[in-house]
Image (cartoon, rainbow, N blue to C red):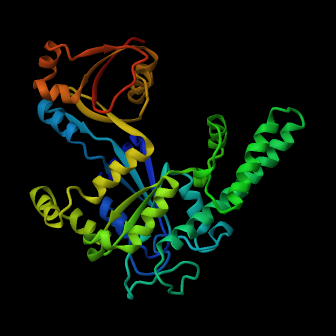
Amino acid sequence: MLLEHNIKTAREICFMKLGIVGLPNVGKSTLFNAITNAGAESANYPFCTIDPNVGMVAVPDARLDKLAEIYEPDKKTPAVIEFVDIAGLVKGASQGAGLGNKFLANIRETDAIVHVVRCFDDENIMHVVADAGTNVPVDPVGDIEAIDMELIMADLDMVQRRVDKAQKAAKGDKKFLHEADVFKALAEHLDAGKSARTFDCSDDDKALIATSDLLTLKPVIYAANMDEDGFANQKDNEYLKKVQTLAAAEGSEVLPICAKLEQDIAELEGEEKQMFLDELGIAESGLDRLIKCSYSLLGLISFLTYGKDECRAWTIRKGTKAPQAAGKIHSDIERGFIRAEVIAYDDMIKYGSVNAAKEKGQLRSEGKDYVVQDGDMIYFRFNV
């Protein structure tokens, strides 16, 4: 977890913002506490997280750690993810129920949604869906549908406004007729209770719809929050199976997790942490798995810059070309791009150093059309 006084700097370099959402009392703030150590208030009553709690988390990267060992730089800068713990939602949020208006505004600012779903029974913890004072049986699929419907209803309102705007514009320019038709079809899709993510259309129409900033277009990771017994016996967890079936149908990711265990893991470091993970029979913490899941879902990779002054990991989208990757460092480097001197991290490790790899012909000079690969170590040549 990054220190408080570093948060402004972290925000400036942050590439990914994940909103942690869920119905009240599903373990949302407990998970946020565990992965950020930010100390967000966690209590067994609805709406304890009224304002979004923000945590900046350094992305673990063994490659960056190794480069720091080799170069002993003045500064080591990891990639950063921003997590936002967003206030609990109930049915009717799209009409302002509960803290719905705050919820919808905050989720709109995120790149992806981490939807925490309760997959455990506990008579001491209320399960709230519509009425904050009414306890109902645990139903993970029903919970997902409750939040989805609120997002869909909010999107439907926005899409209808887009149809009206396009129809008015079409009176002066017929090119807007197609836009009106696309959003009409999308409105029918949403009205049937389906998310914008599952709307089938051409790539051009997808690009058009993407300009509307819809909530149900956002990629989703379902964090299936289980108790310790359920997490230890995932094959027999019926709640988890239901979430996995739903996610498979819509192309979303599922992250099995136990928020309470993650709290324990977050308090440990080094060998003690690894011993605890070994005892649990898991290779990585929930944070590490969530980050990998997020990168995969959003199509992200990292390239590395290195030297005595700084070793740093930079996050970009798959398919990014060298000049645009350089622009992540500074716009002047993109504008004055000449070439990228590239070596794959694995090749550098194989030969022991950049110089040794260079002698073996592994250091390449790449031009403007080079597509940066995950783990590329790059030195950019530029002139402005």
> In this orientation, does residue 247 appear?
yes
Query: In the image, is 349 to the left or to the right of 119?
Result: left
Residue plotted at (29% across, 72% down): 260
Which image quadrant: the N terminus? bottom left
Residue plotted at (32% across, 33% down): 374
Instruction: Choose between 205 and 309: the one closer to the eye.
Output: 205
Residue plotted at (20% across, 30% down): 346
> In this orientation, does residue 308 appear?
no
Furthest residue toward right: 171
Q: Is residue 35 above or below residue 341?
A: below
Query: In the image, is 180 to the left or to the right of 196?
Result: right
Location of residue 17 in the rendering, given as x and y in whole percent from the top left corner: 45, 49
Q: Is residue 216 above or below residue 72?
A: below
Residue plotted at (21% across, 37% down): 63
Query: In the image, is 384 to the left or to the right of 357?
Result: right
Instruction: Choose between 36 and 163: the one closer to the eye.
Output: 163
Location of residue 377 in the rendering, given as x and y in whole percent from the top left corner: 26, 26
Which image quadrant: the C terminus? top left
Q: Quadrant of residue 188?
A: bottom right
